Image (tube, helix red, strand yellow):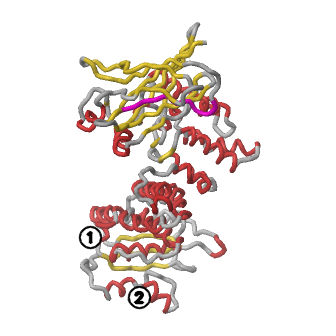
Amino acid sequence: MASPEEKTEADGKGNALKGFNSFIKERDLLYLPDHALRVQIVSKRPHGEERIATEESPKPEAEGSDNVRNGTYISRRSRGVDFSTTGDGSGDEVINVNSKLLSRKSDLFRKLFNEMKTAVLEEPLTIQIEASEEKAFFGLLEFIYFSSLSASSYEEIVDLLMISDEFQVLSCAYKCIEQLVHTLNSALSCFELSHKASWIQVKELLLKEAIKYVTQTDPQRMMFPKLKEDRDIMSMKDELLPLPFSGIEAIFRMDRIPVESEDAVYDFIQYWAQTHYPKPEDHSAAKELHLERLIRFNYLTPQKLEEALQSDFFHPESASMAVIEALALKARDPCTRGLGPGWCSSNHLRERRYKRPPVTVNRLWYPEFDRCEVYCSLTMSDLLDMFHSIGSRESEDFQFGHQLFSLVASCKVGTSEFSFELCITAKAEILGKNVYATRFLAMKEVDDLVDFVEMGTGTFMPSKEEKAGCDDLLPGFWPQLLTGTGPFIHGGILLLCVEITCRR
């Protein structure tokens, strides 16, 4: 059966809503019409001149308001454009709808019909839309009635998504996003669309599905579905690099994107800025974007914190405040992980979904030797992943003296039981023949007191061995973890500390 749009086009008319009433009558409907809905279609003047709203033109109470005034709701796109029955694409259509069905599927229609009842207006509810929205508005009504999408092209799906966002029809928005994430380019566009969407549920859905696509859709994953590890968002950096700032902002404001470390995010933001603002005279425009707000400074290494103060693309005062706040937090509580909004003045200190757990390093200087305390924590999610995969988690790299190190926590299987192993590993080029004394500690509850307790000691000479550590750092840890008992988990987190000492 032809849709109203197809019928009117066949009759030489361009109005998709003209055939709506007859189209509804031809279908067996569970919900019969009980209300008239007037749709005012406004258009721009010829040659691109807009009709400017007059004093008599209906206006909403506030930009972005859901309130209906004098029985009229004005869509965002048509605000500031005067209603007129003259000119191409302008008109006034009255269609018969079922208010209960529209209210059940659309949060906005529910509010509008409820406000109409309160106001006791004799005139029907009026929706003002811009002429370019008419096809999408009919598509939305068609979905509400029949749960089918008439949109097929990318542009049509985006238009339908945006009007689903405005009228708050989550089920239609979900179907549109499902169509968009079938290809990489359109999935990436979801990041930018999330910036344009106004309803928080649509924003979150766009970001969630786009992230899911770009991090999990991989030919190798399709061939080997047992691969458990999600792709790092930075594996898509060539595809992300051309995105405008609105897309980049939408991505890196998210808390749960999978990324190796915050240093990797910092490097990408710098690379993106250098690509889009290559000339020195463009740097001031980059600073106005406040790119530093996309960085979680508490999880940067000291080297990157120092670089951030010298960045040509960050706003100097804002970056300096972020670095100071991060350093103060690291000094005050080096084991804090997974900060919530109440911990700090800005959410750029909140943790992402890091593939390499962040560490905090405290340097201590003594007359005869250097020492550092390296704090690392593992969440319940980290630990359960390690246990079920019999795998390991490597921390981000840290520097002590001239040598780079990392910590590696592993779940090992012995002849009769599982053990928790923690090692220190030398990275990159081995410099010198230094011997490091190591001390391994874990936060443990003893006699109702919780503090770091020494669990093992050792020595490490990187020039002779790749790693050194404790094979069974926490005896009986895995059974205790699975049964929810034991003294090592506090607030859902295992807190570890490695003390490294080197004589001068």
Residue position for label 2: 2
Q: Position of residue 476 (x, y in %)?
A: 28, 30
Label 1 vs label 2: CA separation? 25 Å
Locate the C terminus by quadrant: top right
Q: Residue at x 49, y 51 (%)?
A: 231
Left or right position of 367 against 197:
right
Between residues 150 and 366, which one lies in front from this camera angle?
Answer: 366
Residue 411 image-quadrant placement: top left
Q: Against 218, is 296 above or below?
A: above
Between residues 356 and 454, which one lies in front from this camera angle?
Answer: 454
Q: Against 68, is 149 above or below?
A: below
Residues packed near mark 1 inside 10 Å, few (<14), some (14 to 19) or many (20 plus): some
Q: Amino acid at mark 2?
A: Ala
Q: Against 237, is 419 above or below?
A: above
N-term mark: 1 or 2: 2
Left or right position of 297 against 446:
right
Q: Which mark is residue 327?
A: none
Residue position for label 1: 100
Residue 19 image-quadrant placement: bottom left
Between residues 483 and 359, which one lies in front from this camera angle?
Answer: 483
Left or right position of 375 against 114:
right
Q: Residue at x 57, y 66 (%)?
A: 52
The majority secondary structure of the magenta stretch comes to strand
Q: Specify whether residue 62 is in view.
A: no
Q: Specify whether residue 429 is in view.
A: yes
Q: Please provide the residue range marked out in magenta.
A: 420-429
**In the displayed image of the protein, which residue is found farthest to the bottom?**
11
Q: Against 204, is 465 above or below?
A: above
Residue 6: say if magenta.
no
Q: Secondary structure at mark 1?
A: helix
Residues packed near mark 2 inside 10 Å, few (<14), some (14 to 19) or many (20 plus): few
Q: Position of residue 471 (x, y in %)?
A: 39, 29
